[in-house]
Amino acid sequence: MAQGRILIIDDDPDITEAMTVVLENRGYEVCSARDSVEGREQLQKAKPDLIILDVMMRTSQEGFELSRELKNNAKYKDIPILMLTGVKDKTGLDFKSAAGDESWLPVEEFLDKPVKPSVLLEKVEDLLQKS
Amino acid sequence: MENLLKSNSLIGQAYWLIRLRWVAIVTLATASFVAGTVMRVSLPASALYTMSGLLLAYNLVLYELLRYWTRGNKDPSPTRIGDILTFQISGDLFILAAILHFSGGIENPFSFFFVFHMIIASILRPRWQSYLQATLAVVLFGGLCLLEGAGVIPHYGLTGFSGHGLYSNGTHVLGYLLVFTITLYLVVYMTTSISEQLRAHQEELEKANTQLEEKDQVKNEYVLRVTHDIKGHLAAIESCLEVVASGMLGPLNDKQKDFVGRAHRRTTKCMAFVMALLKLTRMKLSGRLDVERFSLHDCVLSSLASVQSRAREKSIVLHHQIDPAIREVQGEAVLIEETITNMLFNAVKYTPAAAWAWKSSRTVTSSRSRSRIRASASPRPHCRTSSRNSTGPRTPALSSAMGRAWAWPLPSRSSNGTAAASGSRTIPAAAAPSRSHCPTT
């Protein structure tokens, strides 16, 4: 069984629930938040090893803004962020190639929704191992 | 020919006048030669040739002036170009009056050429300027006729062509000038009326077109937003189904697995449609194509997988054979897969409970050429088609569909090859083109 605490920040409860089942099934401890405000609270409470972060929540860039904020915070900057979104389909921009750019998109990994359970687990394991 | 009614094509109009003048120069020189040499009409040839030369020089100067002003995509002010147009039209009237002076004056039927100048002025310039040009023409020609008639300036008669003395016949001159004046003003009135109506109509059309483009933009933005929302819901459905299908929430019996699988496949398909719609809308909004590298091999396999269940329902067995030479291509993956899938669906739909074949071949003639996907079905021995390439009939929708869903081979990897899914069953007439001899089902 895998070990680790994961925080999912996504405004879609169905996707959050589905990912929670997948991750818990593998043995991870999962908590969730519906937006960046809730996300910050959960960060303090849960102290996650990994954050799965959606982009478009209350605003179209909330996820981007939160990722920059976290990476600029010494307390959270080492927590890897896996960004999940369908924003590429709307904008046509390839965010995947920009992932890791510290000034613009400071996240460790970027995946387009929907993500297959196997891909999600693979990425999560990979990021947790690296961290 | 450029749109002469468009107010923003003044430079084009100026060049158009210059082109017309080249024709006029050649015509003047030729007419002088023919009239003097062939028709034996008494003309001051040297004066007329000099006029041709002056006209040539005048046109060259105007041409160079325009080129200078428009060099390096410079955009001269509309006022300046408008002044040039006015100058050209007025200049032409002076030149025509001078030519007529040296070629019979009122006796020369070419005096009707003033009408052409009035038409040109009425099309290219505002109404009030056109009337001024008509007035200038009347003054020039009228003055010429009156001065010649009064003997103030010499008259060069067209001996051998028209009768003498008309120029000095006061009644004839006044009558002629009256008709001439009325004609010119009427021409200006009618032409400006028509051209103004056309210009107004054109402006309305342009405005309507702009509005349509704006509405199309709004519609596309709306489609983009709605489609993105639909995609969000589909992604959630797909994620939930995957969790259920994977057995994470408990084991499923065969029937449950089957139904969850069906729902998952339909969701995946729906997601593909939504993605394609998103992509198309984005391309429409941005005005550029969004190409990507993809495996044509996988694309064909995916299409085949999509129609498997439909084929199974009709007890049709699908066989395929794909040439390994076909690997990656560059293009619109979603559209190409949809095209192939639709083609296969049609083939299955119109096939009775009998085998059929589908063949996809890709021909690359050069690294820059477009690849082609050709679909065909091989009939059973008793059901021959007369397709010339003997690969069977093309699915009707393919040609037009391929117009949108295109692919380029990647130069480094492409090579001639054929991908084929072959079998040995019958295709019905409905799926085949008109030359098929298959019985209608």
Image (cartoon, grey):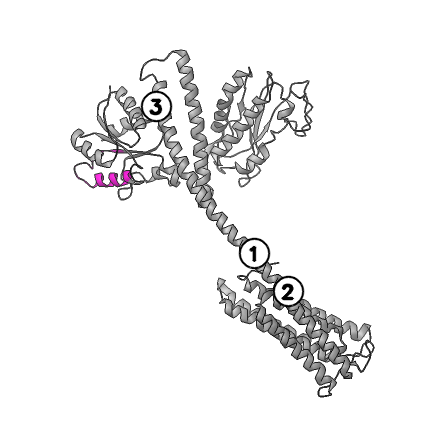
Q: Are marks 1 and 2 in contact (CB under 8 Å)?
A: no
Observer-nearest of B342 and B172: B172
Assign a secondary structure to mark 1.
helix
Letter of the chain that mark 3 sits on in the rendering: B
Q: Is residue B61 visible?
A: no
Chain letter behind tag 2: B
Label 2 vs 3, first from the N-terminus: 2
Mark 2 and mark 3 on one chain? yes
Residue flagged by tag 3: what amino acid is it?
A: Cys
Q: Is residue B40 left or right of residue B234?
A: right
Per the rendering, the mark at residue B241 is none
Comes first in the chain, label 1 or label 2: 2
Q: Which mark is residue B191?
A: 2
Which of pointers 1 and 3 lies earlier in the amino acid sequence?
1
Mark 3 residue element = helix
Across and down, in percent, residue B261 comes to: 42, 19
- Kindly indicate the quadrant of the structure image that contains residue B380: top right
